[in-house]
C-alpha cells in the first residue's frame, strides 16, 4: 500500500476506450492507497457519470484562444507555431490551469494519456516550476494519426513528440506496434518505451444484464456488431459496404454502437447501399457488453488502432472477432489470426467473406475467453504504479 498523490490528465471525458481505461486505472490506484485526482479539460462528456467515487474530478479552466496562443509562443517559441493557427489543440487553452493545479497540488507523479495531454503536461510542469514525476501513455499509432489528419497541429505531432517526450520520466505504449511506431516516427529510443497492454474492462460482467429493448433480438437473423466512435479512423464505411455484400448472400442485421461526426454520412451510405432497413446506428451505449454477449460476430474495421480494447472485450464475451490487419494492436491481440480473422484494411469483399465464415463456423467461445484473460487490470495497474513511483522502467 502507498499513500502517494497521483494526478491523472485527460483532454476530455468523451466515451472512448482511453477514457474508460484511465478511470478504471485510477480506481485501481486508489484501491492501492493512492490519493487520485483527475485533471480534465472537458469534463462534460458521457464518461463523467462513470467516474469512480474514489477519484476527485478537477475540471480545468479554459483561457481564451488568443491568450492561449500568446502563452504557447512565450513558452515554446518556434515549437508553438503549428499550434497557434485557426485550429488549436484544446489542451492549449487549459495549459495555464493545468500548471496551476500541478503547483498547488504538488502530486508525486502525473499520468497523462493521449498525445495532446502528454505534451500539455510536460509543458505545464515547466510552467509550474515543479519536479513532479511524469509518465506518458501513447495510445495510437503516431505516424497514422499525423499523416491522415487535416489539422496542422496533429501533423506536427511527430516533431513535437520527438523534441519533448524525452523530458518524461517514463513513456508507455499500449502495444508493441505503437511502441515501434512511436520510436520510428518521433526518433525516440525504443528502449525508453515500456509496453503495457490495456485490459478487459471490469464492467464486462454487465454482459449478463437483460437484452436491450430492440426487436432484432427476437428474430433469428445473425447480428453483426460494430463498436466505436463514428470517425474516419474506424472506417465504418467499409463495414457497411461489406455488410451490403454479405446481405446479397444471406440474411443478417448490422448494429453499430457509438456516436461521432460520420453519423449522417454512414446513414446515407446504408441507404445508398440498399441495406438501410437492416442497419441500426444505435449511438453511444453505456453498456455495449449486452450486445456483445448476444451478437454473432464483432467486425473491427479500423485504419489504425493503438490497442483495440473492443477486441479484448468481445473475446471476453466469447464473441468471434473479424478485424483489419491495421497498424497497431489488433494483430497482437488476435495473435496473427489465431483468435480471430484478420483482413486487409479497406477491403470490403474480404471483410464480408470473413464475417460470413465466422457466422457459419464460429471459434470455440471458451478459447476466446481464455485469450481475453491474458489482459488484466491488476497486472497493468501494478506496472503503472511502479513507473509512477519510480520503482521500475522496464521496456518490453
Image (cartoon, grey):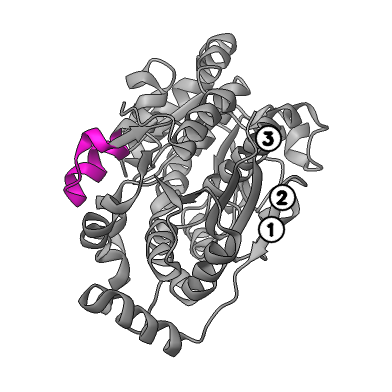
Q: Quadrant of residue 376?
A: top right
Q: Is residue 313 above or below residue 271?
A: above
Q: Nearer the viewer, mark 2 or mark 1?
A: 1
Q: CA distance from mark 3 to mark 2?
A: 18 Å
Question: Residue at the location (63% across, 30% down)?
Answer: 295
Q: Is residue 248 visible?
A: no
Q: Nearer the viewer, mark 3 or mark 1?
A: 3
Q: Is residue 351 above or below residue 140?
A: above
Question: Residue at the location (48% across, 64% down)?
Answer: 265
Please tell me whether mark 3 sits on a helix, a strand or a loop.
Answer: loop
Q: Quadrant of residue 188?
A: top left
Q: Which mark is residue 80?
A: none
Please tell me whether mark 1 sits on a helix, a strand or a loop.
Answer: strand
Whether pointer 3 and pointer 2 mark residues with C-beta atoms closer than 8 Å, the reply is no
Q: Report which residue position mark 1 lands on.
A: 57
Q: Report which residue position mark 3 lands on.
A: 33
Q: Report which residue position mark 2 lands on.
A: 51
Q: Is residue 308 above or below residue 103?
A: above
Please tell me whether mark 2 sits on a helix, a strand or a loop.
Answer: loop
Tell me the magenta residue range.
177-192
Q: With 189 as the anchor, is 342 left or right in this view?
A: right
Along the polypeptide, which appears first: circle 3 or circle 1? Answer: 3
Q: CA distance from mark 3 to mark 1?
A: 17 Å
Q: With 173 as the anchor, is 1 left or right in this view?
A: right
Quadrant for the C terminus in the image: top left
Amino acid at each position: 500500500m502507498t499513500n502517494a498523490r497521483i494526478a491523472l490528465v485527460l483532454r476530455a471525458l468523451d466515451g472512448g476506450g482511453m477514457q474508460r481505461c484511465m478511470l478504471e486505472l485510477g480506481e485501481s490506484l486508489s484501491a492501492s492507497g493512492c490519493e487520485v485526482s483527475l485533471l480534465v479539460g472537458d469534463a462534460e462528456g458521457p464518461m463523467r457519470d462513470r467516474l469512480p467515487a474514489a477519484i476527485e474530478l478537477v475540471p480545468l479552466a479554459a483561457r481564451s484562444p488568443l491568450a492561449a496562443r500568446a502563452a504557447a509562443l512565450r513558452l515554446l517559441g518556434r515549437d508553438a507555431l503549428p499550434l497557434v493557427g485557426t485550429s488549436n489543440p484544446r489542451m492549449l487553452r487549459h495549459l495555464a490551469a493545468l500548471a496551476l493545479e500541478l503547483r498547488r497540488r504538488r502530486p508525486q507523479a502525473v499520468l497523462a494519456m493521449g498525445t495532446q495531454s502528454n505534451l500539455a503536461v510536460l509543458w505545464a510542469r515547466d510552467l509550474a516550476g515543479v519536479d513532479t514525476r511524469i509518465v506518458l501513455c501513447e495510445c495510437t499509432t503516431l505516424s497514422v494519426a499525423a499523416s491522415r489528419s487535416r489539422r496542422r497541429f496533429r501533423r506536427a505531432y511527430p516533431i513535437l513528440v520527438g523534441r519533448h517526450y524525452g523530458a518524461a520520466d517514463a513513456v508507455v505504449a499500449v502495444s508493441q506496434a505503437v511502441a515501434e511506431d512511436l520510436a520510428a516516427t518521433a526518433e525516440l529510443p525504443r528502449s525508453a518505451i515500456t509496453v503495457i497492454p490495456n485490459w478487459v474492462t471490469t464492467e464486462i460482467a454487465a454482459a449478463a444484464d437483460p437484452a436491450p429493448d430492440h426487436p432484432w433480438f427476437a428474430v433469428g437473423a445473425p447480428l453483426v456488431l460494430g463498436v466505436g466512435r463514428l470517425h474516419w479512423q474506424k472506417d465504418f464505411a467499409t463495414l457497411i459496404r461489406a455488410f451490403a455484400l454479405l446481405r446479397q448472400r444471406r440474411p443478417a442485421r448490422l448494429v453499430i454502437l457509438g456516436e461521432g461526426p460520420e453519423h449522417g454520412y454512414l446513414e446515407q451510405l446504408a441507404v445508398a447501399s440498399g441495406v438501410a432497413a437492416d442497419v441500426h446506428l444505435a449511438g453511444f451505449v453505456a453498456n455495449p457488453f449486452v450486445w456483445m454477449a448476444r451478437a454473432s460476430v464483432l467486425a473491427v474495421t479500423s485504419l489504425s488502432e493503438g490497442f483495440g480494447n473492443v477486441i479484448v472485450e468481445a473475446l471476453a464475451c466469447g464473441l468471434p472477432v473479424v478485424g483489419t490487419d491495421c497498424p497497431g494492436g489488433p494483430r497482437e491481440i488476435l495473435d496473427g489470426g489465431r483468435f480471430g480473422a484478420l483482413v486487409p484494411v479497406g477491403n470490403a469483399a474480404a471483410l464480408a467473406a470473413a464475417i460470413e465464415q465466422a457466422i457459419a463456423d464460429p471459434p470455440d467461445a471458451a478459447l476466446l475467453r481464455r485469450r481475453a484473460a491474458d489482459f488484466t487490470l491488476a497486472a497493468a495497474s501494478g506496472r503503472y504504479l511502479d513507473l509512477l513511483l519510480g520503482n521500475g522502467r522496464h521496456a518490453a
